[in-house]
Image (cartoon, rainbow, N blue to C red):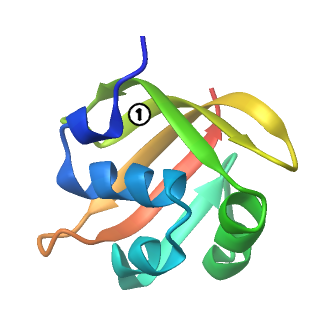
Amino acid sequence: MTIQPAKLSDPAVRAFVSAVNSHDRERFLSLLAPDATMADDGSDRDLAEWIDGEIFSSHGHMEVDNESRCGRRILARFRNDTWGEMRTKWTFTVEDDGRISRFETGQA
């Protein structure tokens, strides 16, 4: 059963999923620490390039199925116009100021 974004436990992760699903690039970027990093399937990627290609230019969308680690790890069905839908895992590192300094994703 899908967990609605508003019901996610961690405020930063909740805002992240909401920004992805509403295609709000400005809001999404405001959630990230200035030196934020990310990895996809175990490889570090260029953050700006990845979010443009995988989320914003390809209409990315997340449906969260499960959360753990106080809401900082989620399992989600992620889809975009490039790859279609896939089951993915996401892990977030959130700083004391509430901004995301790193996220890692990959197929689950």
Expressed as whole percent of the image width and height from the top left, the position of residue 46 reads 68, 77
Of residues 13 and 102, the one drawn nearer to the viewer in this rendering:
13
In the shown orientation, is residue 44 left or right of residue 74?
right
Left or right of 10, for residue 67: right
Instruction: Decide: is 77 above or below 82.
Output: above
How many numbered circles does the render carry?
A: 1
Residue 57 in the image, given as x and y percentages of width and height: 76, 68
Identity of the residue drawn at 66% across and 51% down: 60
Q: Which element carries disc 1, helix, strand or loop?
A: strand
Q: In which quarter of the view is residue 35 placed?
A: bottom left
Judging depth in this view, the residue of 38 and 83 nearest the camera is: 83
Q: Mark 1 points at which residue?
A: 74
For the point 78% across and 59% down, which residue is it? 58
Looking at the image, residue 92 sits to the left or right of residue 88; the answer is left
Quarter in which the C terminus is drawn: top right
The quadrant in which residue 66 appears is: top left
